[in-house]
Amino acid sequence: MGMEKMSGERKKRRMRQKKVTAVQKLYETCRDVFANCGPGVVPSVEGVDKLKTILNGITSSDVGVWPNMPYFKVKETSRFPRITYLHLTEWDKFSIGIFLLPPSGILPLHNHPQMTVFSKLLFGTMHIKAYDWVDDGSSISTPEADSSKGEVGPVSGPVSVRLAKLKVNSAFTAPCDTSILYPTDGGNMHCFTAITSCAVLDVLGPPYCDPEGRHCQYYRTHPFTCFSVGDKKLADDEKTEDYAWLEEIDKPAGLLEVGAPYNGPKIVEK
């Protein structure tokens, strides 16, 4: 009887283990990896690898999203087709959510202050353009732009800009590895442009928090050749197209991000 009881307990343990969903495992891994982190604090190398491995294995069916969902049927003809956000969970240490972008959907260039961010493209093809600051300095007030040099965006008189270096400028098609950006490296400021319908599973550690100064800041880019500022010169082996001046701007007019219920496998918060 003792052996039968032990065998029964083993079966029960195996059954409990089988019932752990992929999204539940993701949540529990985030709780572990971000436990001792905070603003500007990057998880350990082991923690980063562990979370990346979990995300690499997650599929769209694991979180209940598919390309034929109504969110991807574009009706707007504006510059910014509506983007939908599914909120899975949020704690003071991290948040988990899914962005649903219809074809031509854009998340304009924005930052992730003091955050480590994991982004997993669940399906679709997406172009990502990302920058890191060249230094830790503050913004610089520039002289007037040379309109003959093709700056991006309207410039009227001096503007406040900061130099950034291009980190990523490529199209990605699922399935592909999870991308990771860090507080000061990896492309902390990035722009997503959906070429097809796309779903992106995002883990932010820590999440945005306006009271703590972690708000989402948007940017306009200007070519490096647009301004001549102080001693900002490139080495002979560097290309001007790998650098840009970033100007802080308000949230772009017409950008619409709406929340919708997450109906995938539930997370049991512990």
Image (cartoon, rainbow, N blue to C red):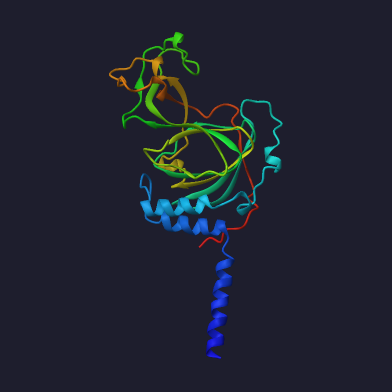
Residue at 40% in and 54% down: 47
Asked if residue 224 is positioned above or below residue 190 in the image, the reply reads: above
Residue at 68% in and 38% down: 72
Where's residue 166, x and y in %? 42, 29
Asked if residue 12 is positioned above or below residue 104 in the image, the reply reads: below
Count every numbered label the image shows and give the total: 0
Q: Nearer the viewer, residue 221 or 14?
A: 14
Asked if residue 50 is positioned above or below residue 207 in the image, the reply reads: below
Where's residue 87, x and y in %? 58, 48
Residue at 56% in and 61% down: 268
Q: Would residue 188 appear left or right of 174 to someone viewing this image?
A: left
Residue at 55% in and 85% down: 5
Where's residue 117, x and y in %? 45, 44
Asked if residue 213 is positioned above or below residue 138 in the image, the reply reads: below
Quadrant of the drawing holding the N terminus: bottom right
Q: Residue furthest left?
A: 231
Q: Would residue 30 appear left or right of 22 to someone viewing this image?
A: left
